[in-house]
Image (cartoon, rainbow, N blue to C red):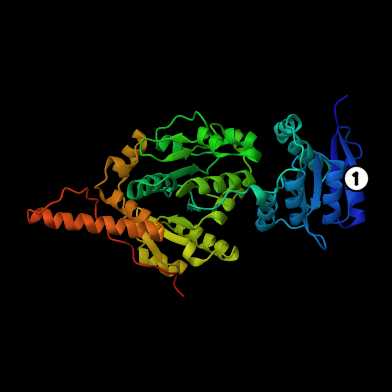
């Protein structure tokens, strides 16, 4: 006989719990093993009953579903949570997924929708259940606070709310530029899990990808992560997206958050190429980022989407200094000037990248970032300027000192007193830019 999927129902209304149980009554492969009326009771029952799936209401008095899900994910990791709510807003969905929920159902839902969601979540967790069953765990699993890596590096997300603005090109060259300017440890993450192009941009084979880390996500360590990261000739390490779109479904927002925290603890800079959407993984990366490079082009649809994103960023309480608006292909004759963009969206442009269609196309087709293939070109200089914009204060000071030494050597060389030091290119630093009040 096939083992039934054991379900715990959590809702502060008894009638709702009863109605959900009735929806599942005739599902032969699903069994309701209990019900709880609040978040605290759900944690206790989860520990006692060890259900496969928990149907959790998000809004409850006392401890709500978000807090209860976080506690259950830490103490009973084999339980999968499906969040339920009458609210369908993206913020509710984001909070639920970041707390550890696998799916989100908007009330009212049909019996077929409910049963299908339970089966889907149960199937996705098959590998995790097998690992947990095989592992010897004499003590309760450590809470995320005990195992979360220490923050040390700087996380930078490159985001464009519209496709075709050059997001991946900028992310790749930004990562290589940071390595070139500082010589420090830089990681590049392809956060566009479904249709990522970082591997193509860097001419890397997809031997190992982010999907290979999911089975060990609960016990992720430095050695495991190092085996999956792919090295590039520039010195950066790359975490590639899954080789097939269907594998992207295995990577949740919480998985991506955990991976980014580990990378930030091991690298000086982590650059994330995000998807051009507000999905959970992208929001997780944006939330963790110290800086967000917001890309736009001089086109009305792009500007419109940037304005919408700025409204979302304000609702999410992102500080203004976290965002840097960058215009790509900014010298194109489209009839729209950078000043027009600033006036329209009431946000200052931090940097501009000129057009170089033929040069960039060649770089993409060859799989060589333009900052390596044409380091003296106008586009490369603009991209290196962008890299300077996200440097830590300490690294900026160190770079300025090296540049000053280089200028001194140049003057000495002209006067016949050169000392033979290595001279780095001198780049003009960005001025501080803030949003228009």
Q: Is residue 185 above or below residue 246?
A: below
Whether residue 427 is visible, yes or no, is: no
Q: Is residue 166 above or below residue 210?
A: below
Q: Is residue 159 left or right of residue 327?
A: right
Where residue 27 appears, x then y in whole percent? 88, 35
The structure residue drawn at horizontal position 46% and vertical position 44%, both measured from the top left corner, is 187
Q: Secondary structure at mark 1?
A: strand
Please tell me how crowded label 1 is: few (under 14), some (14-19), or many (20+) other residues with Cα within 10 Å.
Answer: some
Where residue 190 appears, x then y in whole percent? 50, 42
Q: Is residue 64 left or right of residue 404?
A: right
**In the foreground, 63 or 240:** 63
**In the foreground, 236 or 363:** 236
Q: Is residue 255 above or below residue 106?
A: above
Where residue 86 appears, x then y in whole percent? 77, 57
Q: Is residue 318 left or right of residue 201?
A: right
Whether residue 193 is visible, yes or no, is: yes
**In the foreground, 313 or 231:** 231
The structure residue drawn at horizontal position 71% and vertical position 44%, both measured from the top left corner, is 102
Residue extending furthest toward the left: 416
Q: Is residue 229 above or below residue 297?
A: above
Where residue 332 appears, x then y in whole percent? 32, 54
Report the quarter where the N terminus lies.
top right
The structure residue drawn at horizontal position 34% and vertical position 60%, both measured from the top left corner, is 397
Residue extending furthest toward the bottom: 437
Q: Which residue position holds label 1?
A: 34
């Amino acid at each position: 006989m096939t083992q039934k999927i054991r379900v715990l129902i959590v809702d502060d209304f008894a009638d709702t719990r009863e109605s959900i149980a009735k929806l599942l009554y005739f599902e032969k492969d699903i069994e309701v093993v209990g019900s709880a009326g609040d978040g605290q009771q759900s944690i206790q029952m989860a520990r006692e009953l060890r259900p496969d799936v928990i149907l959790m209401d998000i809004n409850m008095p006392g401890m709500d579903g978000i807090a209860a899900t976080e506690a259950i994910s830490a103490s009973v990791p084999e339980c999968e949570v499906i969040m339920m709510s009458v609210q369908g807003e993206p913020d509710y969905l984001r909070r639920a997924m970041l707390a550890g929920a696998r799916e989100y159902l908007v009330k009212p839902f049909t019996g077929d929708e409910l049963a299908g969601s339970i089966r889907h979540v149960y199937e996705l967790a098959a590998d995790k259940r097998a690992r947990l069953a095989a592992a010897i765990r004499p003590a309760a699993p450590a809470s995320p606070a005990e195992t979360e890596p220490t923050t040390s590096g700087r996380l930078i997300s490159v985001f464009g709310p519209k496709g075709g603005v050059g997001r991946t090109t900028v992310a790749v060259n930004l990562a290589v530029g940071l390595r070139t300017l500082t010589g420090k440890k830089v990681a590049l993450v392809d956060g566009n899990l479904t249709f990522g192009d970082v591997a193509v941009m860097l001419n890397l084979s997809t031997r190992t990808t982010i999907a290979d880390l999911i089975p060990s996500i609960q016990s992720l360590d430095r050695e495991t992560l190092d085996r999956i990261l792919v090295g590039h000739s520039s010195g950066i390490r790359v975490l590639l997206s899954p080789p097939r779109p269907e594998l992207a479904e295995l990577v949740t927002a919480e998985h991506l958050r955990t991976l980014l925290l580990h990378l930030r603890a091991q690298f000086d800079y982590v650059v994330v190429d995000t998807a051009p959407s507000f999905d959970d993984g992208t929001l997780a990366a944006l939330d963790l980022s110290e800086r967000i490079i917001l890309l736009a082009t001089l086109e009305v649809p792009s500007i419109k989407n940037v304005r919408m994103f700025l409204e979302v960023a304000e609702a999410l309480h992102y500080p203004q200094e976290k965002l840097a608006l960058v215009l790509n292909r900014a010298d194109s004759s489209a009839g729209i000037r950078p000043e027009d963009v600033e006036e329209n969206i009431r946000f200052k442009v931090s940097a501009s990248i000129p057009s170089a269609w033929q040069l960039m196309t060649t770089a993409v087709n060859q799989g060589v970032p333009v900052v390596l293939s044409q380091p003296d070109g106008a586009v490369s200089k603009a991209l290196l300027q962008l890299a300077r914009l996200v440097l830590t204060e300490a690294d900026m000071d160190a770079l300025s000192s090296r540049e000053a030494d280089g200028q001194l050597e140049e003057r000495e060389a002209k006067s016949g007193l050169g000392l033979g030091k290595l001279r780095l290119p001198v780049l003009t630093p960005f001025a501080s830019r803030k949003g228009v009040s």
